[in-house]
């Protein structure tokens, strides 16, 4: 593929480099320990590399955490008022990206191992040694930096080299989207992003956040379709201890955590009436109560919502509140499906291919043959950009040749323009598993487990979808996974759906 052509096809919202937490002069570290000598030592050791805040109890620490902007937390595993692991879980609830380093009496204690299993960044044994402590905290801060790389929106074709995600597109409809982002990101109003699954709605939400006045504040995303109604309510608004079976402690919801920040509500159409009413109240009055609580709380949280569902129709059918729809769609950004902006396909191919080439270490890969590109441009991409990305990654992973030709493309793409009724394609799996394992063993493969698992997962999902005539809600229920997870797998494995199931 001509890289210049692809470069030309890449565009951007103008421009101001997105704000980053790292523009602040010093990273900041929170140290929570009831031993004053530890606090003093940490303060002295770390002050050269970070602003250090200290807290002597869990309650004080969590308070400071919520009121601050910390890049790493150094946490004692045994605090007087709360178990360190419980504190850790609350920190994760608040912001999953903050690395937490535990301090333990015995460096290899079982609690420390448990903490690592829960996802802690690392642990360090007491008594603390100055240099290992500084090195570890530096590493943690660096990790935080890496995980906070913003979505870049750039005209630069060095796109794939950028650590963050880029927003590719030059089709007129995408330029309108970029303009809209530029226009409304600084206005503190709710925004509704509409478009089919996989068109990039979450990318738009993150770009809106990064270019807003709240770009240095919290950004949290909730997929409303991924949780059952009762859990969604508690996820969004929190709950009081004992408010329902299993509510063993108070939980702070996303609206509260996100005070001052931006909350992205994905799949906003998938909400029970009770949750719709509570969300509407937050939009109107910024007020809500935790589940099982009487105390009225307030939040200053910008809401960005997304949906691929026909909300107007749902209002007509009595499934969705009209007042909520009007509150949400004051400003709407519409993302066109990929089939309506096929001119963006070459740039997207190049972007995803360069990423995959690096990730899968395929230095000899040159690109896609012109015939293959034509087929990509002729296909209608029912799964939109997410599907295109999954197909490219699969091709790059599978190819043993420097150029990917039509032979290396999935059958739905090579069939030319796909029919309006997509198909659940037969996966020749199931019976083929023993052969696959045998072949992988013969090839001295070192990822037999991953490949066999993928093969099985694809088979199981395809079979269940066939049994439900492509109905995803039923299939998710039968499989015992959320609809969000199912959608993700369908897209990853490029499974196409129909209500009239055929075997390809
Ligand atoms: N214009 C684009 N440029 C680069 N990558 C893109 C673009 N649009 C989408 N993507 C990528 O495609 C994938 C799907 O995008 P995203 O999750 O934003 O879609 P979505 O519309 O929110 O989907 P869903 O409705 O299923 O949640 C992501 O990996 C995203 O980074």
Image (spheres, helix red, strand yellow):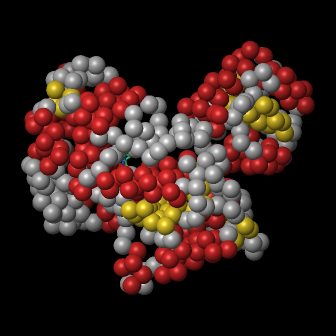
Using the image, determine if residue 283 lies above or below residue 260: below
Q: Position of residue 330 (x, y in %)?
A: 51, 71
* Near-viewer residue (146 or 462): 146
Q: Quadrant of residue 470?
A: bottom left
Observer able to see residue 357: yes
The answer to whether residue 400 is left or right of residue 202 is: left
Q: Looking at the picture, tell me which residue is in the foreground, 136 or 349.
A: 349
Query: Which quadrant holds the N terminus?
Result: top left
In the image: residue 477, left or right of residue 132: left
Q: Where residue 417 sits: x, y (%)?
A: 12, 53
Residue 432 position in % (x across, y down): 16, 39
Against 174, is 101 above or below?
above
In the image, residue 316 sits, relative to residue 301, either above or below, namely below
- In the displayed orientation, state which residue is furthest to the right: 36
Measured from the top left, where is residue 295 in percent x and y?
Answer: 77, 72
Determine the residue positioned at 15% across, 66% down.
500
For residue 157, side relative to residue 208 (left or right): left
357 lies left or right of 191: left
- Comparing 77 with 378, the one in front is 378
Image point (30%, 27%), residue name: 357
Residue at the image position 88 percent from the left and 26 percent from the top: 40
What residue lies at 15% left-to-right and 63% top-to-bottom? 420
Compared to 127, does 480 lie above or below?
below
Q: Quadrant of residue 124?
A: top right
Q: Is residue 390 visible?
A: no
Q: Quadrant of residue 371?
A: top left
The number of callouts visible is 0
């Amino acid at each position: 593929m001509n890289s210049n052509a692809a470069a030309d096809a890449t565009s951007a919202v103008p421009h101001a480099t997105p704000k980053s937490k790292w523009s602040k002069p010093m990273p900041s570290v929170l140290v929570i320990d009831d031993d004053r000598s530890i606090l003093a030592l940490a303060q002295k050791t770390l002050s050269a590399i970070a602003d250090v805040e200290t807290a002597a109890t869990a309650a004080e620490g969590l308070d400071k955490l919520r009121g601050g902007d910390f890049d790493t937390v150094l946490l004692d595993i045994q605090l007087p008022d709360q178990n360190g692991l419980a504190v850790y879980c609350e920190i994760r609830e608040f912001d999953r990206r903050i690395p937490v380093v535990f301090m333990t009496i015995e460096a290899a204690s079982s609690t420390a191992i448990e903490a690592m299993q829960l996802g802690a960044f690392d642990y360090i044994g007491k008594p603390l040694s100055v240099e290992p402590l500084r090195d570890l905290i530096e590493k943690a801060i660096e990790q935080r930096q890496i995980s906070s790389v913003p979505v870049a929106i750039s005209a630069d074709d060095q796109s794939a080299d950028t650590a963050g995600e880029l927003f590719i597109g030059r089709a007129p409809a995408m330029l309108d989207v970029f303009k809209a982002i530029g226009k409304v990101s600084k206005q503190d109003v709710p925004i509704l992003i509409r478009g089919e699954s996989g068109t990039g709605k979450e990318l738009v939400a993150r770009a809106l956040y990064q270019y807003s006045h709240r770009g240095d504040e919290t950004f949290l995303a909730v997929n409303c379709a991924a949780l059952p109604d009762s859990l969604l309510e508690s996820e969004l608004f929190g709950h009081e201890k004992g408010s329902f079976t299993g509510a063993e402690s108070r939980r702070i919801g996303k609206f509260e955590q996100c005070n001052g920040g931006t909350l992205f509500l994905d799949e906003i159409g998938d909400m029970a009436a009770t949750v719709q009413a509570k969300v509407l109240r937050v939009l109107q009055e910024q007020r809500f109560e935790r589940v099982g609580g009487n105390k009225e709380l307030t939040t200053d949280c910008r809401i960005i919502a997304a949906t691929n569902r026909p909300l107007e129709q749902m209002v007509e059918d009595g499934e969705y509140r009209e007042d909520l729809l009007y509150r949400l769609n004051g400003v709407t950004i519409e993302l066109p499906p990929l089939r309506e902006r096929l001119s963006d396909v070459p740039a997207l191919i190049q972007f995803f291919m360069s990423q995959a080439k690096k990730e899968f270490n395929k230095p000899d890969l040159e690109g896609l043959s012109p015939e293959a590109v034509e087929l990509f441009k002729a296909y209608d991409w029912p799964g939109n950009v997410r599907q295109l990305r999954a197909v490219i990654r699969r091709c790059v992973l599978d190819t043993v040749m420097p150029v990917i030709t039509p032979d290396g493309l999935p059958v739905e793409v090579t069939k030319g323009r796909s029919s309006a009724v997509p198909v659940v394609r037969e996966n020749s799996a199931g019976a083929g598993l023993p052969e696959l394992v045998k072949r992988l063993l013969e090839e001295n493969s070192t990822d037999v487990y991953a490949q066999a698992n993928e093969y099985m997962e694809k088979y199981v999902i395809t079979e269940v979808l066939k049994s439900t005539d492509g109905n995803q809600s039923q299939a998710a229920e039968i499989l015992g996974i959320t609809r969000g997870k199912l959608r993700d797998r369908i897209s990853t494995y490029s499974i196409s759906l129909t209500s009239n199931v055929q075997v390809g």
